[in-house]
Image (cartoon, rainbow, N blue to C red):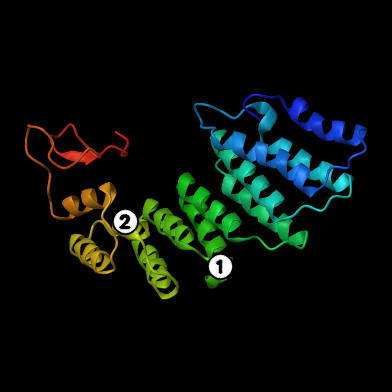
Amino acid sequence: AGQVYSWDEVFGVLELMKEKGLEPDVYSYNCVMNVCAKTTRTATTRRPVHLEWGWDRGLEVLAHMKDNGVQPDVVTYTALLDTCLNSLRAAGDDESVRHGRSVLDMMREDGIEPNTVSYTSLINAAKLQGSPRAVQLGYETFLEMRPETRNLRTYTVMIGAFARVGRAEDAWAVFCDAKKMLAPDTILYSAIMGAVASDRKLVLQLHDEMKEAGCVDDDVVLWQIKQAKGYTGPRGGASRIGDGFRTNPTGGYEPKWKRS
């Protein structure tokens, strides 16, 4: 809705409800908050979020709820967190993760415990921001979670965040922790192989372990294994390693998802 309708049009529906004798409840407000979150999700530094659907609007929805005696729930705050992280990151704000942490504090002050989605969203934002400070804040968030509430995505994004700042030993510790709690999948194995890529022998050992666990190779893993084996591909000629790869400027191969 935020891509098509203005703030006044969407929020005006709540006023229309009141005129018809219907009092907006938490579900009504959550719909508007989710519009904020989904609209900011498509924002980038090249395509900033529309001014009508940023972080300030999310806070306005929250304030409006409380002014009307409607108690926010975990869905409300998780959508507000997404709005905060996405819009501020798109605006180039280096403190978006810190602001996201403040949303978690707001939740707790309201007596609401952040859930797996909330925590994982913030850790993923730390990975995307990629600064040492952001990753440390992400790790502090990770440690605040009860181990049983972490899922595969939580572990994967935490490992990916450590990989971005060269904290391979910390990434390995998280991977070992994940194995105690869950059965790793291909994506988790790929994340840890990326974090320890400088140790080619370890990457190959992880791949063997992954295959023994019944996980299936994807294009990313295949590329990682070829890198670990020192494979650069034939010079010239057609690719023989699948549609998920392309020729790079050096004559070797790289996955299509990799930015040039």
Q: Which residue is mark 1?
A: 149
Please provide percent x and percent y for residue 223: 22, 48
Q: Secondary structure at mark 2?
A: helix
Please indicate whether residue 222 sits to the left or right of residue 194 in the image: left
Please provide percent x and percent y for residue 142: 53, 63
Q: Depth check: give the residue in front, 95 or 227.
A: 227
Q: Which residue is mark 2?
A: 190
Amino acid on which the number 2 mark rests in the picture = Ser
Please indicate whether residue 259 sits to the left or right of residue 11 in the image: left
Q: Look at the picture and state if 220 lies above or below 250.
A: below
Quarter where residue 190 is shown: bottom left
Residue drawn 60% across and 38% down?
A: 38
Q: Is residue 111 visible?
A: yes
Q: Depth check: give the residue in front, 195 or 62.
A: 62
Residue drawn 50% across and 51% down?
A: 124
Q: Secondary structure at mark 1?
A: helix
